Image (spheres, rainbow, N blue to C red):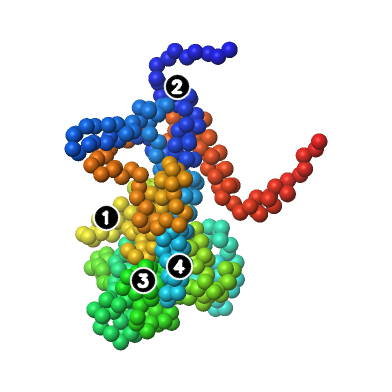
Amino acid sequence: MSKMLDVGPSDAVLGAAGVGDAESRARGCSRPIRLVGSRQSVNTATGEITTVYSSDQELDGRTYVRCGNRRASVCPSCSHEYKGDAWHLLMCGLAGGKGVPANVADHPCTFVTLTAPSFGAVHGKRRTGLCRPRRDHPLCPHGRPLWCSKRHEESDPQVGQPLCGQCYDYVGHVLWQWHAPELWRRFTIALQRALAKKAEVDLTTFRATCRISYSKVVEFQSRGLIHVHAPFRLDGPDGPDGGPSSLPLTVADLEDAIRDAAASVTLTEPGLEGTAYELRWGRQVDTRTISGATARDDRSRSAAHPEQVAAYLAKYLTKSTEDFGLSGRVRSSEHARLLGASPHVVRIIAAAEQLAGSVDNLARIADRHATLGYRGHPITKSRAYSVTFGQLRRLRRLHHRRPARLDPDADVRRVLDEDEPPEGFVHVSAFRYVGRGYLSTAEAAEAVRSAALSRIRSLPTQFVSREAKSQPAERK
């Protein structure tokens, strides 16, 4: 016997009735964005207006949109999707795919790591075993040991902490982190000049015959400073769609030019009390030739397979400064301390507060406490490196709506979105933000279940089979 509910359309009732419906629209997102509004199609000739979509059509009267957060600790589902998109973006620029020609793999290409300079000795996990062994056991001016004979693990909270917090240059640390994007810009300009010099042509000729393509990914180190990882590729003037450059430049030339450019770039910026800092990249610059001929499991430090590089970089994109105990918004060093941040991180933010209050052009550092003063994006790329995140998301929308219409060999860069109106019409959208998250705990639980199932389906078949075989047989 079924029951008849004669109640008004309250949020609680509609939320309970829509269990699974909202989740299916948000596709497993943990904290989807709730919108209210509509999309209308306007005939430009007659002025006739037709409603294409409205939130009123949904069971609970709301439109659910995935949050799109890249942080795994915030939304595992969106983070998993972001990581997959990043892998495709990076991989297409190294080996082709999604419309990018496969012959890009024949272009000179190398994987570069630019490091931050040292602002003081810190604890770390070393390949040789002991942290900082010293036979003479010296002390710093503040009486603290400048040695450490421990064998630290990655999970050790001491990793990344200074041997002496008073000796550590926190002002220089924050200044370098804040100006790292400008150092990168100057580095890319210096790289063009260094390559032109190696090719024995002027800069104008170089730019007309050779194009530098790259994708830059930022990784936070345990000491709170960033490292920059970037695959660099030399193309002809037509980018990935054309052949290699006609200039006689090899991978070795590219790697030498990268080291020369990194060493030449400097930037002078004011610090506290009239001091000035000369900012530059760290002395350690790593290069690894990228080649499809390299074994996928090759651990040498001179070469790398394209899949190795793409997987390595995509992994770090879903991490953030939350590893240091920070949330998405940090108001002050005291707020960071209350959040459970380490003393080292608290001092970094305290130095940022000092600089923001003392140096005129550094007031905006206060908006970047959560990223320890870094103001750039986690991933950027040159225009012609490969496909974009937007193109990959457009392809996914088309696949979810009309999978049969999607050509598996289609060039992602030229796939049109179905949201684009036909000729003679324009689409007018008006949506209003009304909240974040699901209206009921049942919907949230279903989203977690859906995200977990989605990740299980993406595992290799042999792995799933092996896991199934490891389960005890059911008794009959």
- Mark 4 — residue? 102
Residue name at image x 48 percent, y 75 percent:
289
Image quarter for residue 6?
top left
> Label 3 sits on what residue type?
Gly
Using the image, determine if residue 472 lies above or below residue 181.
Answer: above
Badge 4 or badge 3: first in the primary sequence: 4
- Residue nearest the observer in this picture, 46 or 133: 46
Badge 3 or badge 1: first in the primary sequence: 3
Please state, as top left, top right, bottom left or bottom right, where the N terminus lies in the image: top right
Of circles 1 and 2, the one toward us is 2
Disc 1 to disc 4, how far (Cα)?
A: 43 Å
> Label 1 sits on what residue type?
Arg
Using the image, determine if residue 470 lies above or below residue 446.
Answer: below
Q: Residues within 10 Å of mark 2 (few under 14, many from 20)?
A: some
Of circles 3 and 2, the one toward us is 3
Is disc 4 placed on a helix, strand or loop?
Answer: helix
- Mark 2 — residue? 13
- Mark 3 — residue? 242
> Label 2 sits on what residue type?
Val
Q: Residues within 10 Å of mark 4 (few under 14, many from 20)?
A: some
Of circles 3 and 1, the one toward us is 3
